[in-house]
Amino acid sequence: MASAAQSRIKSISYAKYGYMFIAPFFLVYCFFQIWPLIYTFILSFKGNQANNAAWVGFDNYSQILFGTGSSQGAAGVHEEFARALGNTFVLWFGNFIPQILLSLLLAVWFTDAKVKLPGKGFFKIVMYMPNIITAASVAALYVNLFGDSKYYFVNSTLMKLGFIAESDPIQFVAGPTASKVMVMFIQTWLWFGNTMIMLMSGIMGISPSLFEAADIDGANSTQQFFKITLPLLQPIMVYTLVTSMIGGLQMFDLPYLYHNGANFSKQLETVAVYIYYNFNKGTVDQASYGFAGAASIIIFAITAVLGSITFYMNRDKDAIAKKKQRKKAEKQMKAKMKQGGLSI
């Protein structure tokens, strides 16, 4: 039998030390994140100008979402937000789909033991390097490479090769379609290396015995990919989708910076850019604080709903079915014991 001293030693809890270590993070987070979120929510129900901070209820939401409300320009507010929201989804889908396909292809290739590719480590580093470059530097680089006039590198090269006329340079920056394609390409170039590394970690976590058994059974590489690799990558794929969705719906830096001088294209106005412009519109008396706050809450709600749907559709159905069966068996057991006059 254990002595009283041993019992006291075993009953000592060290959880408080863990809380002490994580307390600074939560304090900083609450100060710099929680209150701004709460204040943004409050701001979305108030008037737009600093000298008109009256409570307006859901009027800002009504104008942004439906084009109805107290303001005469409600239809224009709704139209601008709808265009920004559409641009956001187009730019996100346009860079996420090629990014995930390219990353998955490279991840499978680099982790395949049958592929004897020399210098795999070098290629991994090179492909990941764009991810550590700041968006401002990348935007400045591409604007100076793909400028709209004949004096910029890409247009100048295409003219010398005879692909385009000197009087008709391609509008890579100001063009409504070309500018979107360029932002999609830059986003894919920036992030595919990071996505590839995450998918590689997921593939390397799959037991090699599964692939060895598939080889013995005569399964080819395509069958192994669709029957083993892809199903077991589901958790990391869901993580990649959700993080990309959060980043894509909050896309600000590249769409805002990818323009020439003061000529910002409305075709690149995302919801984050819309919020920034409303919050920093001219003077304090012209700033649309209420619209900016309402747009922030709306994009937060859209992100939360899409994230919840993603998790719901990718939940472990087998585990849920087993849990239901276990609960059903427990209920049946309790009912039988009650009928037999036994207490649990």
Image (tube, rainbow, N blue to C red):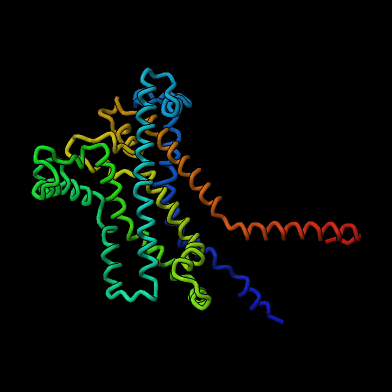
Q: Seen from this angle, which residue lies furthest bottom? A: 1
User: Image quadrant of residue 113?
Assistant: bottom left
- Which residue occupies 22% across, 37% down? 175
Q: Tell me: 202 left or right of 273.
A: right
Position of 336 relative to 8 (above/below): above
Position of 269 relative to 119 (above/below): above
How many numbered circles are shown? 0
Q: Nearer the viewer, residue 343 or 239?
A: 239
| Image position, residue 28 (x, y; %) | 40, 52
| Image position, residue 254 (x, y; %) | 27, 45
Q: Quadrant of the N terminus?
A: bottom right
Q: Tell me: 197 left or right of 164.
A: right
Q: Quadrant of the C terminus?
A: bottom right
User: Image quadrant of residue 339?
Assistant: bottom right
Q: Nearer the viewer, residue 330 or 223?
A: 223
| Image position, residue 238 (x, y; %) | 47, 55
Position of 186 relative to 219 (above/below): above
- Which residue occupies 58% across, 58% down? 316
Position of 334 relative to 212 (above/below): above
| Image position, residue 147 (x, y; %) | 15, 43
- Which residue occupies 37% across, 33% down? 292
Q: Nearer the viewer, residue 171 or 203?
A: 171
